Amino acid sequence: MVKRTSLENADCPVARSLDAIGDWWSLMIIRDAFLGMRRFGEFQKSLGLAKNILTTRLRTLVGCGILELVPASDGSAYREYALTQKGRDLFPILVALRQWGETYAFAPGEVPNFLVDRKSGQPVQKLEVRATSGRRLNSFDTEVRPRQ
Amino acid sequence: MVKRTSLENADCPVARSLDAIGDWWSLMIIRDAFLGMRRFGEFQKSLGLAKNILTTRLRTLVGCGILELVPASDGSAYREYALTQKGRDLFPILVALRQWGETYAFAPGEVPNFLVDRKSGQPVQKLEVRATSGRRLNSFDTEVRPRQ
DNA sequence: GCGTTTGGTTTCATAATGCAACTAGAAAGT
DNA sequence: ACTTTCTAGTTGCATTATGAAACCAAACGC
């Protein structure tokens, strides 16, 4: 993955995030990690991507602290890729992508799989952007302040 | 952009979303669109990407209904790229990317630019994943149900 | 009408991705 | 202990995407 953040965008957090996770495979790997996958072979089988590509992606994700290599949970000599706290904090991004996909990327007949609260079995609430006051905000209600 | 959703992932909304917007430039274009940019030249100057690449990305985004070509707002014969409702609904994804970047992609000394509520001037609330009951959920509290 | 700006297209070089064959170390069977 | 299989890669090569620069036509500004 090439760092493409140009100078004029360098202080934009969106650009910085995309430098870390802004390609198809990285986010799919992270999605699978949230589903509980931890082994090279699991990711490879699930995603069907070339092994050399998977190698570079996993290495990048470990390198930027989203995944870490830990001893295998089954006691074998192999190692597993586990989400760090930094990686687990990507959860809202995945949920946002999921909810948008549920809304817009399925034809009327198709049924997507659903993210549910384990306890209630109910789908999770739709993410909402809010002001500190709790008021709901859309994009027109907000602006980016160059510094602070 | 190549459709890479494999069969086993075809019913995952995350994969579907990434088919539409899962590359660096597309999301950067959408970010700029949220900042109010509408013209080819504006995107090109802001992002510094090659014009042929911008052409294909804009065409893809129009093709999947995230942007639409509208008559120029200044009355000229040129046309502008405007976010559709489908595009505006990407807002939570951008906010999630931004908040993660703010937290993790800046060194202690660096100050990111900030997304603020226009009215109060305050940064927006951190996005939270919640159950229908309102209880906060993390990734361990949730699971994906194959169909419904 | 004439030069400039806008929004592209075309061509060619370079970089990323994908595929298949190969490999070292660990595990499992016998 | 020895062989086989499994896991997690690496290597080499073909294909595809990306990027830089030159070129171009329609629209605009004067």
Image (cartoon, coloured by chain):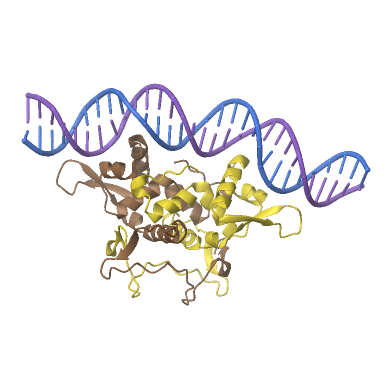
Chain colours: A yellow, B brown, C purple, D blue
Residue B110 picture quarter: bottom left
Residue at 24% from the left image edge and 46% from the top image edge: B80
Residue B3 rendering spot, x and y as whole percentages: 48, 43
Residue nearest the observer in this picture, D4 or A11? A11
Residue nearest the observer in this picture, A26 or B131? A26
Residue nearest the observer in this picture, A25 or C5? C5
Residue at 35% from the left image edge and 74% from the top image edge: A134
Residue B108 rendering spot, x and y as whole percentages: 44, 60
Residue D7 rendering spot, x and y as whole percentages: 72, 48
Residue A113 rendering spot, x and y as whole percentages: 53, 60
Residue at 33% from the left image edge and 62% from the top image edge: B115
Left or right relative to C9: residue B138: right
Residue at 26% from the left image edge and 44% from the top image edge: B42
Q: Is residue B93 above or below residue B61?
A: below
Q: Is residue A145 visible?
A: yes
Q: Is residue B10 visible?
A: no
Quarter of the picture holding the N terminus of chain B: top left
Residue nearest the observer in this picture, A82 or B84? A82
Left or right relative to A141: residue A66: right
